[in-house]
Amino acid sequence: MNLGELVLDGKPRDIFQYQDELEKIGLGVPQASGVIHSLRKAGIHIDKECITAEEAAQAIASVLL
């Protein structure tokens, strides 16, 4: 919700994919989601949305190995 208007709807794991949009309305994402988002922007293909440090570590390791 932003100023009474529904902006995004869905499960948190799906919503956290929209980090840029969330930041525009003053919301953040879990740190692990932010790291994965930054890696994607840098051109590293990680297809899994991660919300915990463990998930992020596994996803990054799978790309590197």
Image (cartoon, rainbow, N blue to C red):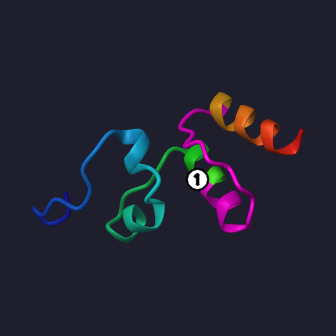
In the rendered structure, the answer to whether residue 63 lies left or right of residue 1 reads right
Q: Give the residue displayed 37% in from the left and 71% down from the top.
A: 24
Query: What range is drawn magenta here?
Result: 37-53
Q: Quadrant of residue 13?
A: top left
Question: Where the N terminus falls, by quadrant?
Answer: bottom left
Point out residue 53 in the picture as x, y percentages from the top left corner. Answer: 65, 33
Secondary-structure class at tag 1: helix
Q: Is 35 above or below relative to 23?
A: above
Q: Quadrant of residue 62?
A: top right
Q: Which residue is mark 1?
A: 34
Q: Is 24 above or below relative to 58?
A: below
Q: Is 9 above or below relative to 19?
A: above
- Relative depth, front residue between 23 and 46: 46
Question: Where the C terminus falls, by quadrant?
Answer: top right
Point out residue 36 in the picture as x, y percentages from the top left corner. Answer: 64, 51
Q: Which amino acid type corresponds to the residue marked 1 in the rendered image?
A: Gly
Point out residue 34 in the picture as x, y percentages from the top left corner. Answer: 58, 53
Kindly report the secondary structure that dominates the magenta region of the rendered protein: loop
Q: Give the residue displayed 43% in from the left and 54% down from the top.
A: 28
Residue 48 painted magenta: yes
Point out residue 59 in the picture as x, y percentages from the top left corner. Answer: 71, 38
- Relative depth, front residue between 29 and 11: 11
Furthest residue in direction right, as rendered: 65
Q: Give the residue displayed 20% in from the left and 63% down from the top.
A: 2
